[in-house]
């Protein structure tokens, strides 16, 4: 039976499929209800961020799910406006309060900024104080990973990046593997933009799986933790039903050939911190 967890560098276990919550709203209990549905369908890895403005609803859904807290892996992130040592610690405490939880499993730096050294020092403090079980970063390039490794006392355990068949990030994956950093994919199915791709459609028919399931399975076989986001119940079910098949090596290679180092759209935050 396929293992559905991976170990981070500190031994903490993380489920290999997550549930993304970007754009879920607190209003009308949307975030709360969808979180409860996702947990009921088997998700144990929940990903949010202070920037999403839905931590209250996510936390409420977790508390009302009936699942013991230790069975869930909850991630949130510090936003760019809260970079720096004191700001990061304050932001963490606000997120913890909004979520209504006693601890966070994984706390991430949402984007690298000029104050990354002080921000990371705060992340290390939170980890040492056992406020969080693991710490990491998002959207770090090869050079930025190498730099943070150079000054950190505790290395990032996760790098969450945009990754999908059109942006496969093979070099970054190699660097992260070398430093024992687990890679997570945000927008792993490129927000549905790959559903019409001829290769993906062909493999969907071959394996009798949806286009999204083919792409998510490709991530898992590349040792990437996928964090798909959807609010539609049928898609929530579909996205976690990827453990009953395996894509053959030649088909993995064919999906790899789709890569064009292409982003969904330019990211206005990616130039806040540059490594020379």
Image: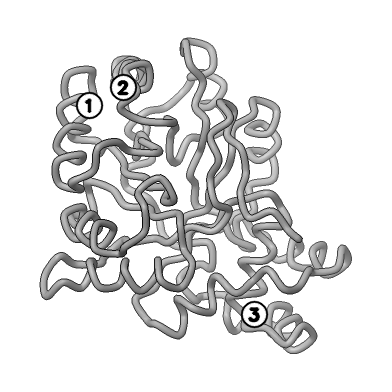
**In the figure, is residue 246 to the left or right of 182?**
right
- Tag 1 near tag 3, CB within 8 Å: no
Q: Image quadrant of residue 170?
A: top right
Q: Where's residue 98, x and y in %?
A: 15, 46
- Residue at mark 1 to residue at mark 3: CA–CA distance: 41 Å
Circle 1 sits in a helix, a strand or a loop, which is it? Answer: helix
Q: Name the residue under label 1.
A: 88
Residue pointed to by mark 3: 197
Q: Which of 211 and 261 is in front in this view?
A: 211
- Nearest the camera: 276 or 206? 206
**Residue drawn at point x = 61 percent, y = 54 percent:** 261
Q: Which of marks 1 and 3 is nearer the N terminus?
A: 1
Q: In which quarter of the image is the N terminus?
A: bottom right
Q: What residue is pinned by disc 2?
A: 126
- Circle 2 SS class: helix
Residue 113, compared with residue 74, is above or below; it is above
């Amino acid at each position: 039976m396929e293992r559905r967890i991976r170990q981070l560098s500190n031994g903490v276990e993380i489920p290999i499929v997550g549930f993304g919550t970007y754009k879920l709203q607190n209003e009308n209990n949307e975030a709360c209800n969808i979180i409860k549905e996702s947990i009921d369908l088997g998700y144990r890895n929940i990903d949010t961020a202070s920037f999403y403005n839905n931590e209250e609803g996510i936390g409420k859904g977790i508390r009302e799910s009936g699942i013991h807290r230790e069975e869930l892996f909850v991630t949130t992130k510090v936003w760019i406006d809260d970079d720096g040592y004191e700001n990061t610690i304050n932001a963490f405490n606000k997120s913890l309060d909004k979520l209504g939880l006693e601890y966070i499993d994984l706390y991430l730096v949402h984007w690298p900024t000029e104050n990354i050294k002080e921000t990371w020092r705060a992340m290390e403090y939170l980890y040492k104080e056992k406020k969080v079980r693991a710490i990491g970063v998002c959207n770090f390039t090869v050079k930025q990973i190498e730099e943070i490794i150079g000054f950190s006392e505790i290395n990032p355990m996760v790098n969450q990046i945009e990754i999908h068949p059109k942006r496969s990030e093979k070099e970054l994956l190699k660097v992260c593997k070398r430093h024992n950093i687990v890679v997570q994919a945000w927008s792993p199915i490129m927000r549905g933009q790959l559903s019409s791709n001829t290769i993906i459609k062909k493999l969907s028919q071959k394996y009798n799986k949806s286009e999204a399931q083919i792409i998510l399975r490709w991530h898992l076989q590349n040792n990437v933790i996928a964090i798909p986001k959807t609010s539609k119940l049928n898609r929530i079910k579909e996205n976690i039903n990827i453990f009953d098949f395996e894509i053959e090596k030649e088909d993995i290679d064919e999906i790899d050939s789709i890569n064009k180092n292409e982003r969904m759209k330019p990211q206005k935050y990616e130039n806040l911190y540059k490594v020379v």
